[in-house]
Amino acid sequence: MNFVRFLAGHRAEFGALLLQHVVLVLVSTGVAVAIGIPIGIIAARRPRLGAPIVWFANIVQTIPSLAMFGFLLPLPFVGGLGARVAIVVLILYALLPIVRTTIAGIRSVDPALVEAGTALGMTPGQLLRQVELPLAVPSIVAGIRVAAVIGVGTATIAAAVGAGGLGEYIFRGLSMVDPSVILAGAVPAAALALTVDGALLWMESGLRRARRHRVRVPVTAAALMLVVAVAALAATRRHGDVIRVGSKNFTEQIVLGELIAQTIERHAGVAVERRLNLGGTFICDRAVRSGDIDVYVEYTGTAATAIFKDPVERDPSRVFEHVRQRYAGAGLTLLPALGYDNTFAILVRGADARRFGLATIGDVAPLAPNWTPGFGYEFLQRADGYPGLVQTYGLRFGRAPRAMDLSLIYRALATHQVDLIAGDATSGLIAAYDLVMLRDDRRYFPPYDAAPVARTATLLRYPRVRAALESLAGRIRVEDIRQMNHAVDAERQDPADVARAALARLEREPRSGG
């Protein structure tokens, strides 16, 4: 019932994401058909020439889809965030079944028929068009069917690189640990895959009954898919100016992304495209530098240590000024901070804290040999993360840290899968799961003031966008963001609704001098 209510309350958004998903599959499958069928024909007629092509397609299929997106992100022309890189990946995955079934279809033609055609004086081209291709069409359509179904499934991963589609609900649900939101993406994606499979199966069956139309089907089908895809893509294109707002892949960032997007929409009068839940720090940093997004919220300590690889600095004002200057050199602007510090929180279960009298991170040292820690992937690699933490506090854990997504780490601690985690000080799940934040008594972590990072060219072109973003400066308190995170994580409220309520509250409150 929660799943049904979620879809009912997000009809417009669901329709847009479904259309994006369909466009991704149509465009990629249509292009794969247009490329794959000719390649398959060449490979069937000239095996030596076709062998390397089939080998390449086989290699592509062995690469995990998420890794493929990661490989292509930094490449020129085909890389970057958005639909472009997603379509390239989907085309690559669709090629193998189409090429293979085209080869199999051409090679399955009875040699006696080819010899008869040759005896009648038919040229190789005529043999292909009038004999081989018509008989191979059912096999080719079967390959297209497989490719399309693969595309529907793989397109859900495309949301991780800002391409939209139903995968946005899946990733959003994972970050919120909300099964209803996950189902809102997974169930329609499964239904779409079954629909596509059924429609192409019906077409395949029809082709087996209608031999006289088979010659034109491959070209006609490819052309029709391309026409529909281009029309759908044109329908979804945004006209006029647009500001692209990004975010990382955890609850607070999604809420902040909505807060930034709605602030721009309200006060700058510019259309906003949301590219939320993109991934970790480095994906968002690359996106804003390349122009795939125009603004996102970063944390000063994260920028200093993870992005710029600078030594850890403790003074908040000095860190902010240093980071601001480093961004300026890259054509980016660090806008005034929102007003709170989201430091890393070393968390333990409340029951353990009370039982062992744990108050500081150093108190964990005697217990560490019997404990299993759990951390996010990024924390394990960062200069201000796990390596420095264990060195500073002399922690010698008896088991290797368990790496997992940030959206799962709090529940893992609450359910005794791990005994200590590094979370966010502003997380709403700290109170929900009765967790205790240990004091950083040796001041290991630098300040992490949340502040928007924007492309300087965008701010110069849209002065009202700068003014809108600066209107949030110093107005978000730790208690505010913790309450917003709790509303999403524990109360299952929609991030857009939570951000909208926060903006309404800010408009009612007078601005202070600070």
Image (cartoon, rainbow, N blue to C red):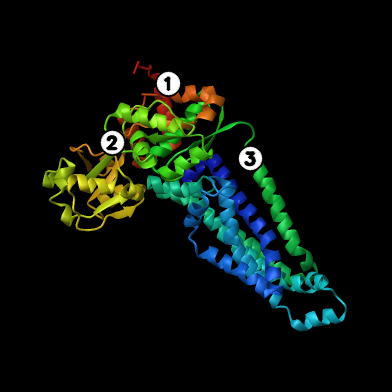
Residue in the image at 46% along x and 26% along y: 469
Instruction: Check the image and name the residue furthest to the right.
Output: 121
State if disc 2 and disc 1 touch (CB < 8 Å). no
Of callouts 2 and 3, which one flags the residue occurring earlier in the amino acid sequence?
3
Q: Which residue is mark 2?
A: 446
What percent of the width, then of the height, locates residue 82?
A: 55, 45
The kind of residue on which mark 1 rests is Glu
On screen, residue 109 versus residue 459, left or right, reads: right
**Callout 2: few (<14), some (14-19), or many (20+) C-alpha neighbours within 10 Å?**
many
The kind of residue on which mark 3 rests is Arg
On screen, residue 422 versus residue 358, left or right, reads: right
Of callouts 3 and 1, which one flags the residue occurring earlier in the amino acid sequence?
3
Q: Which residue is mark 3?
A: 237
The kind of residue on which mark 2 rests is Pro
Q: Which residue is mark 1?
A: 507
Q: Please, what secondary structure does the residue beneath circle 2 have?
A: loop
Q: Nearer the viewer, residue 209 or 467?
A: 467
What percent of the width, then of the height, locates residue 118?
A: 83, 79
Q: Is residue 122 visible?
A: yes
- Which of label 1 and label 2 is nearer to you? 2
Q: Nearer the viewer, residue 75 or 362?
A: 75
Q: CA distance from mark 1 to mark 2?
A: 32 Å
